[in-house]
Structures are given as structure tokens and as C-alpha cells.
Image: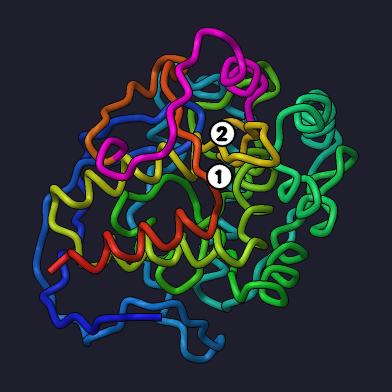
Amino acid sequence: MASITISYSQITPIFSPASNKMKGAAKTMLTDTATTIEPDFTIENFTLSDDDLPAFRDMQFEDINQLELDHPGASDELYRTRRDYIASLSKKFRETGEITDVDYTEEEQGIWRYVAERLEELHQKHASPFYLRAKKDLGISTQRIPQLSEMNRRLKETTGFRLAPIEGLVETRSFLSWLSYRVMLSTQYIRHHSRPEYTPEPDIVHESIGHIPMFTNPNFADYSQFIGHGARIATDKQLEELGRLYWFTVEFGLVEHEGEIKAYGAGLLSSFGELEHAFSDKVERRPFDLEQVINTSYDYSEMQPLLYVIPSYAELKEVTRKYIETFQ
């Protein structure tokens, strides 16, 4: 594989309270920037041992007191307290490096079963065959909430990816940059019981049912790492382009499979409404074109009217590698 080594002043994000919310999936926080020097690194795929990972520093995140009023759990004190407790386990992770399992309540398990069982029917019809196998291999079932520690162990054995608990939403550059080290930041709390079909922020349903299975695919894992490399060296304009690429692939991507179109994006796979909508006649499905994708805006507050179909995960990886190598 061709590669290049880049020497640069890294753009390090600083939290700003202004934000743009991605519906039911990710969130992009507007940032100011400061410049710090980071050692050279090569734009290629590599794995790291636990000892070689950078330290997990405290990262800016949107905590429980910043829940917007339209969040189903914003005015539920019991929910806020419970979410705050689960978020505190993520702080413990950064102190110990060990993922703490959550003792989910029966109500939380009920929310999971309701969502997972309804999604399972749609997955059998519309999800990528690789995703279906991966979900099974990771032990993700409709009956109980999987623990991050379980999935983390299996991911490390397959593609060298890791999961790191996080309290809540982090700003874009920090979130994407951890992918460079084959690390996915993941929440552990679950959505509010009053709206099991919807969450305005990532939760354990979105992470486990949407994102995590795809990291067992070597090409998708490598592609995600290239996104992370790009985020570490991108200008603000390039970071915006990376956000669009991430949106139309990792969150809302479709893939060709034996003459059919299947879903692999987490925003689709973790939402009954989005998944059904994606295969309706209300959506335009275009062949993936990198230049189009990075220059196409989206509205997070609406069902997506336009989706892109990749020919394969291997081709997505290679096109993205070449794109990131232009970040000089």
C-alpha cells in the first residue's frame, strides 16, 4: 500500500457552546481552534497495543445538565440522575483504563427489547449481510443490552478496534480523531422510556445496534481509521467535508450486494423510521461519488431525501485513503 508521512501543526479543537445537532445519531459542535505540534505519522492502517495508545484525556462533552428541552428525558429527574450515574462510569474508565459494566435495570432492558425486536425484522430485509453476521458474532441479541466490555474484547480480536466509554457528545474533531487509533468513543446510557423509537443523541442502542458490528469488517475498520487520520490533520474546511463523508457513509450509508442495495449506516440500522424510509420511493439513491458527497449538505432534522450507495467497503477505503493523502 502506498503511504505518505505528514509533518504538521495539528489543529486542536476547543469547545464552544454553539452546536448543530444530527438527528438521532451524531452531533457536530462548532469549535474555535488552537495549534499544537504533534509528531509525524503515516497515512496507513496500523494497530496499537494497549500500552501504546495515547492517554485518554478529559474531553469536552455535553453533560446531563445541557440536555435540550426537546430531549424526552430533559424534565425527568430520575432519568437524569440515572444517566448521570452511567456517565460517571466513563470518567472512571479514563482513570483506570478498564470498562465498567453497567447493571441495567429491567426498565432499561425492556426499552432495549422493544427497539431491538422491532429493528430485527427490518434488518433481515434491509441490512447488509455482513452486518447481520457481525451482530451475531458479537453476541448482540434482542434479549439484553450488550456490555461494552464484551464487544470490546471481540473487536480487539478481529480488527484491532477498541471501544472507549464517554459521558456524552464530544466535538467533531476529537471524536473522529480517536478513530485514527482504531478507537470508537461510545456512550453506555439508554434513551428515555417515553420515546423508545427516538433519541436526539447517541445511546447504547445507536452504538451497539448501529455502529459497533461494522467495525468487525477489516475494510470498514481501515476506512474508519483513515477518517480519523484525516480529522487529525484537516483544516476547518476539510473537517466539514469529512463530516459530510462520515454522515453519508458511517451514519447513512448503503452498499451494493449481489445486485441489491443494503444498509450499513448506523443512523439507518438503529432507527425504524429511517430504515423504512431509506428503501421507500421518497429517497433518491445515487452511486457513491466522493466529490459529490463531500460537497453535499444535509439536514439532520429531516428524514434523509438523498443517500449514496458504495460498490464495496474495499473501494470506499481506497478512495478515502487517496483523499486523505491530499490533506497537506
The answer to whether the residues at label 1 and label 2 have Cβ atoms under 8 Å apart is yes
Q: Secondary structure at mark 2?
A: helix
Which quadrant, please, contains the C terminus? Answer: bottom left
Res. 45 image quadrant: bottom left
Which quadrant, please, contains the N terminus? Answer: bottom left
Task: Give coordinates of residue 294: x percent, y percent.
Answer: 26, 41
- Side (left or right) of 93 relative to 136: left
Outermost residue to the right: 143
Q: Is residue 273 magenta?
A: yes
Res. 16 image quadrant: top left
Can you identify the residue that label 1 sits on?
84
Nearer-the-camera pick, 258 or 153: 258
Nearer-the-camera pick, 143 or 86: 143
| On screen, residue 52 above or below 155 | below
Nearer-the-camera pick, 99 or 211: 211
| On screen, residue 173 above or below 30 | below
Q: Which mark is residue 35?
A: none
Task: Give coordinates of residue 165: x percent, y percent.
Answer: 56, 60
Q: Amino acid at mark 2?
A: Arg
Can you identify the residue that label 2 sits on?
80
Query: What are the residue bounds of the magenta stretch?
Result: 269-293
| On screen, residue 233 above or below 1 | above
What residue is drawn where x is 56% and y is 86%?
50
What residue is drawn where x is 19% and y is 80%?
6
| On screen, residue 24 above or below 229 | above
Task: Give coordinates of residue 292: x percent, y percent.
Answer: 27, 36
Outermost residue to the front: 259
Q: Sort mark 2 into few (<14), some (14-19) or many (20+) by Cα contacts within 10 Å.
A: some
- Side (left or right) of 15 relative to 265: left
The answer to whether residue 82 shows anywhere in this view is: no
